[in-house]
Image (spheres, rainbow, N blue to C red):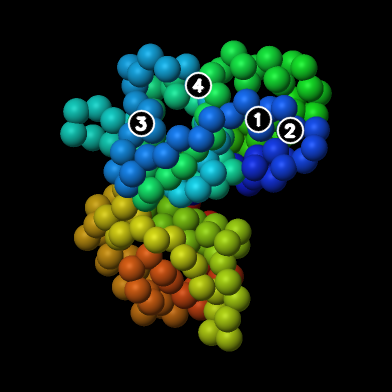
């Protein structure tokens, strides 16, 4: 699940944000690299320009996935979360103080950030609610339905969803195992809701029924 519905990069293309945009430095990371992790000394804000990364909490051999950062999402290096690239990723980065000062100097930047941060807070609560109160089937349905609604491509047979994640990575996002998610995807296929096309690509054949499966909040 994405953190932010608003795409901050779209805001930064406007003339009034030219000074803020110029203060950002581009930095690239290969697939599997950590953009940041707990204990890092850097205190920076970054915006994803290309690629995707997962945000998760880790303790010993356990992981608690919070969501996916993709193009236009903003995050900070000084949280207690790990941010690991799912593919080659490029970010626009600035130190926190510079970013804060730009917000104070330009009301338009501040207004845009209020929208972005409000969206992040809303999505964070949705993720927590799903992990606490919904079962794995509901969480998987929510992930697929959300991707279909936001980024799906309509076709004659349904909505094509490109997640570009392995079944194991999807399982990590919904807090389950590869075997359970694979079984649930097969169940969705038998129920006529979703067809697996190839790695990371799905055809949502009945979006309304998939949304209804998401509404099943039994744990």
Q: Secondary structure at mark 1?
A: helix
Label 4 to label 1: alpha-carbon separation:
16 Å
Mark 4 or mark 2, whichever is nearer to me: 2
State the mark number for residue 22: 1
- Proximity of marks 4 and 2: CB atoms separated by less than 8 Å: no
Q: Secondary structure at mark 3?
A: strand
Residue at which label 2 appears: 18
Q: Quadrant of residue 133?
A: top left
Label 3 to label 1: alpha-carbon separation:
27 Å
Compare marks 3 and 2 and give the one earlier in the sequence: 2
210 vs 114, nearest the viewer: 114
Residue at which label 3 appears: 82
Mark 4 or mark 3, whichever is nearer to me: 4
Q: Secondary structure at mark 2?
A: helix
116 vs 42, nearest the viewer: 42
On screen, residue 36 above or below 3: above
Q: Residues within 10 Å of mark 3 (few under 14, many from 20)?
A: many
Compare marks 3 and 1 and give the one earlier in the sequence: 1
The x, y position of residue 78, in whole percent, is 44, 20
């Amino acid at each position: 699940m994405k953190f932010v519905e608003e795409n901050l990069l779209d805001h930064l293309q406007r003339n009034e944000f030219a000074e803020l945009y110029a203060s950002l430095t581009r930095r690239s990371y290969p697939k599997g690299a950590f953009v940041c992790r707990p204990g890092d000394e850097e205190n920076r804000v970054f915006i994803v320009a290309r690629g995707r990364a997962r945000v998760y909490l880790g303790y010993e051999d356990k992981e608690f996935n919070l969501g996916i950062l993709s193009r236009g999402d903003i995050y900070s290096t000084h949280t207690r979360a790990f941010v690991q690239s799912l593919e080659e990723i490029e970010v626009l980065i600035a130190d926190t103080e510079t970013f804060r000062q730009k917000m104070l100097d330009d009301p338009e930047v501040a207004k845009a950030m209020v929208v972005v941060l409000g969206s992040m807070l809303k999505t964070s609560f949705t993720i927590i609610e799903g992990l606490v109160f919904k079962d794995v089937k509901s969480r998987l349905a929510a992930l697929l339905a959300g991707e279909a609604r936001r980024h799906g491509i309509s076709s004659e047979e349904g909505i094509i969803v490109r997640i570009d994640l392995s079944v194991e990575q999807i399982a990590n996002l919904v807090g389950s195992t590869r075997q359970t998610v694979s079984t649930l995807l097969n169940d969705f296929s038998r129920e006529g809701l979703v067809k697996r096309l190839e790695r990371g690509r799905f055809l949502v054949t009945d979006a309304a029924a998939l949304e209804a499966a998401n509404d099943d909040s039994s744990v």
